Amino acid sequence: MAESTKESAPSPYAAMFEGFRKDLDEHHDRRDKIAKASKDITASSKKMQVGLLMCKSLSPKDEKAKNQHYEAIANQYKSIKSDLEALNTFRYANNITGGNQEFVEAISFEHYLRTQLLITYADASARISKMGDAGGFAELSPEDYMLGILDLTGELMKYAIGGIARDHKLPAGEPSKYTRRVKAASKQQTEHEAMDIDREAHASAYSWPTPGPDGRVRNILDDLRQLRLQLEMFEAPRDTRFASDFEKKMIVMRESVEKVEKSAYSLKVRGSERPKGQLDMGEDRSVAVESY
Amino acid sequence: MSASNGMFSPEIFQDLQARVDRDVKVREELKDITQELEKNVRVVSFALSKAHSTPVSELSSVLEAAEKPIQKVVESVGKLSASASPLPYYKFNDMWSRKMQDATYGVLLWAWLGGKNEAGDTTNGRLLTIDEVGSILNVPVNLKDEDKFHLTIEEYLQAIISLVEELSRLARNSVTLGDYARPLLISKFVKDLLAGFQVLNLKNDNLRRRSDGLKYRVKDVEDVVYDLALRNLIPKPT
């Protein structure tokens, strides 16, 4: 490259580019750090989901395991708090979106197992803010919430099929807990604030829903169908990255709902021709889910 | 919320739809402004492209013809800045980043060709700093804390790459016009810029991909200089 002595003279723009290098390096370091945190949040959230799939209802032991992951996730969010402030709030949205979506999936699943309700956007958002130890931090975008909820349908599908294998019925509410349910209804609005405080009390305050006017308790398939209906109505803005992610996940979501419908069908048709004991593959099923 | 009737209230999704729609509306409003900017930037390129067929001695008319379009670009940038400043910068910057690059490039080329600086002097072959571009376009540059509209260093660097690409073409066309001195000026200039880019630690992104092409543009210019040297056409310094 250097053909003569003239070429090897320092570029008159050297100082200017040195300045740019410093700024770009800072930007890249921040981006890498956030992407790494996002990956760790994803990994911990996945572990949380696997743990949740195993439990029929949240026992103290499950709570402990879940809290470990929760803590790991909180630490990750804390570590990138200062990198996602002010001007940079949206700068790394593409780098954190994976972690946010997976975490929404995990907490919405947990919320569902606890209450058989869908966590609201405000509640999910508040939980992430809380993890950064400050309000307004790492704002959860409506898009990340939607994509996380789409993923939730996959977890619900696995949970429903696990429930069918274990109990020969679709997981559903328990009318016997009707009274506790009523007590909980008033607390519902402030639910997200109770998140870290007194988990035990929180867990017992919620229970499965009451029978509807027709005397039937809604089961997980009813919930999946309601979710599907609303998601189908949602209009993602055209020609955006969100729209293409949304469409892809919609396809998977429809498949999930149909898988549960097929299982419910099999349960009805084949379940009636065999004694219950023969269908009992609870052991096998739980192993399969674990290795997933 | 009547949770006992269902897993959730449909309001959850109505609210989300409203939020998403709000952003769509913001984008639609910005679109008119960015399209106007894009159009005005194109007029500048059109005016300056005559430099390829104009000898240096007559270049001042080309530069003057570009001044009005540049003023229009500055106006568009002003409008954009006013509309976009209250918005979170990085939420919407994909809408204008490319246009700001092209606007910057237009100003850089104009100045390199000899466009007047603030003192009214003309200098051939100068590179405007990012601050100078900012003061011409009347926008802040390289903001780090304040969340408002500005010119980023990435946009400025992208504009420099466009400038090098254009100058490699100008080097050949200068020779066609019988100007054997300008390729030497261009050669030194683009080599200095290439050296500058080599200082940067670029990651796998747009800037990296485009800057990888710089060395080929520099080589194009070197080939022109080589052809001239081989035939003894390079003017002797007097």
Image (cartoon, coloured by chain):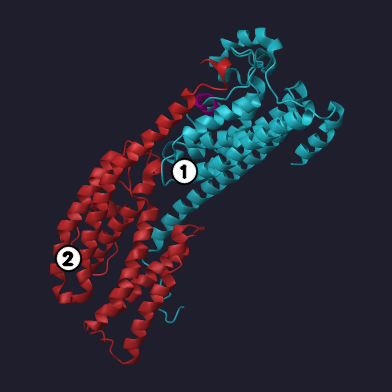
Chain colours: A cyan, B red
Check disc 2 and report the residue beneath it: B63
Up-down: is A204 above or below A34? above
* Magenta-span inclusion, residue A124: yes
Give x and y (percent) for residue B62. Answer: 16, 68
* Residue ID at (78%, 39%): A288
User: Do the residues marked 2 and 1 share a common chain?
Assistant: no
Up-down: is B150 above or below B200? above
* Residue ID at (60%, 26%): A223
Q: Residues within 10 Å of mark 1 (few under 14, many from 20)?
A: some
Q: Chain of mark 2?
A: B
Check disc 1 and report the residue beneath it: A243
- The secondary element bearing badge 1 is classed as helix
Is residue A75 visible in the rendered structure shown here?
no
For the residue marked with disc 2, what is the amino acid? Leu
In depth, the one of B141 and B46 nearer the eye is B46
Q: Left of A70 or right of it: where is A138?
A: left
Quadrant assignment, res B182:
bottom left
Q: Which residues are magenta?
A: A121-125
